[in-house]
C-alpha cells in the first residue's frame, strides 16, 4: 500500500517569521472537531494547543503532567511536557 504524500504550499510577500495555516483539529476519541488557525513550528518535537481548544474538543488532560503557561498576543498557551 502506498502512503499518500501530503504537503501544502504557503506563499508570503517577503520573509515570513511565522507560518499560519487554517486547519481542522479533531479529538479522535469523541470525533469532535473544530476549524482554527494554527501556527506551524517546524522545529517542534511536540504539539501544543490552547486551553480554549482543549475545552471545545473535550480533551481530558493526563493525571500526571507538568504544565507551563505563556502569554502570547494576549492569549494564554498551555504547553505540556
Image (cartoon, rainbow, N blue to C red):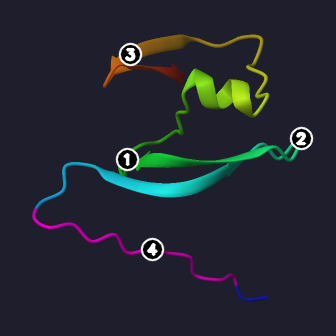
Please say if 32 is above or below 56: below
Secondary structure under tag 3 reads strand
Name the residue beneath numbered marker 4: 8
- Image coordinates for residue 3, horizontal then vertical, percent: 69, 82
Q: Is residue 7 magenta?
A: yes
Mark closest to the chain's N terminus, 3 or 2: 2
Labels in figure, total? 4
**Mark 2 and mark 3 in contact (Cβ < 8 Å)?**
no
Is residue 16 covered in magenta? Answer: no
Q: Residues under labels 3 and 4: Cα distance?
A: 29 Å
- Residue at 43 percent across and 57 percent down: it is 21
Q: Answer few, some or many: residues within 10 Å of disc 2's Cα (few below 14, many 20 plus, some between 14 and 19).
A: few
What residue sits right under mark 1 in the picture?
A: 41
**Residue 9 or 4: which is nearer the viewer?**
9
1 vs 2, front mark = 2
Pointer 4 local density, CA inside 10 Å: few below 14, some 14–19, many at least 20 = few
The picture places residue 68, in percent across and down from the top left corner, at 47, 13
Q: Which residue is mark 2?
A: 30
- Could you tell me if the residues under marks 3 and 4 are in contact, i.e. CB atoms within 8 Å? no
Measure the C-alpha gap from mark 2 to mark 4: 27 Å
Of badges 1 and 4, nearer the viewer stands: 4
Image side of residue 68 versus residue 61, left or right: left
Which quarter of the rendering shows the N terminus? bottom right
Instruction: Tell me the tag on residue 70.
Output: 3
| In the image, farthest residue toward the bottom | 2
Q: Residue furthest left?
A: 14
Marks 1 and 4 sit apart, C-alpha to C-alpha, by: 14 Å
- Which residue occupies 56% across, 76% down? 6
Q: CA distance from mark 1 to mark 3?
A: 16 Å
User: Which residue does the image show at 72% across and 88% down from the upper left?
Assistant: 2
Residues in magenta, as a range? 3-14
> On screen, 19 above or below 62?
below
Amino acid at each position: 500500500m502506498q502512503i499518500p504524500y501530503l504537503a501544502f504550499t504557503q506563499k508570503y510577500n517577503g520573509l515570513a517569521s511565522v507560518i499560519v495555516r487554517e486547519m481542522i483539529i479533531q479529538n479522535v476519541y469523541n470525533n469532535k472537531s473544530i476549524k482554527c488557525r494554527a501556527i506551524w513550528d517546524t522545529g517542534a518535537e511536540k504539539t501544543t494547543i490552547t486551553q480554549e481548544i482543549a475545552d471545545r474538543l473535550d480533551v481530558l488532560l493526563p493525571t500526571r503532567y507538568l504544565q507551563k503557561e505563556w502569554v502570547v498576543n494576549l492569549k494564554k498557551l498551555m504547553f505540556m511536557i
